[in-house]
Amino acid sequence: MAEKKAFVLRVNPEMLKELESWAQQDFRSLNGQIEYLLSEALKKQRRSKGKGPEPEGELV
């Protein structure tokens, strides 16, 4: 598995509360939920540009 890099993410309190609730519903940590959402958005963006399927193991 590739090394993960930490960074600071600033979000407004209302968004944070909704993300925490969503993560809890999906049985994920807040970090895991944000990582999942970013991964799904990247997959969708790649498909819309016609880049084909995602390489195995690249994203979580």
Image (tube, grey):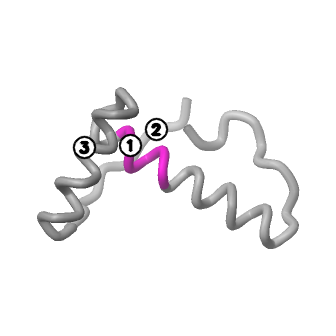
* Image: magenta residue range: 32-37
Residue that mark 1 sits on: 33
Residue 40 in the image, given as x and y percentages of width and height: 59, 52
Residue 27 in the image: above or below residue 45: above
Under circle 3, the secondary element is: helix
Q: Amino acid at mark 1?
A: Gln
Residue that mark 3 sits on: 21
Distance Cα–Cα, label 2 vs label 1: 18 Å
Q: Nearer the viewer, residue 23 or 52?
A: 23
- For disc 2, the neighbor class at 10 Å (few under 14, some 14 to 19, many from 20) is few
Under circle 2, the secondary element is: loop
Tell me which label, 3 or 1, sits earlier in the chain: 3
- For disc 1, the neighbor class at 10 Å (few under 14, some 14 to 19, many from 20) is some
Q: Amino acid at mark 2?
A: Glu
Residue 54 in the image, given as x and y percentages of width and height: 76, 48
Q: Nearer the viewer, mark 2 or mark 3?
A: 3
Residue 30 in the image: above or below residue 11: above
Residue 41 in the image, given as x and y percentages of width and height: 58, 60
Residue 3: image tag? 2
Residue 1 in the image: above or below residue 19: above
Q: Is residue 9 left or right of residue 56?
A: left
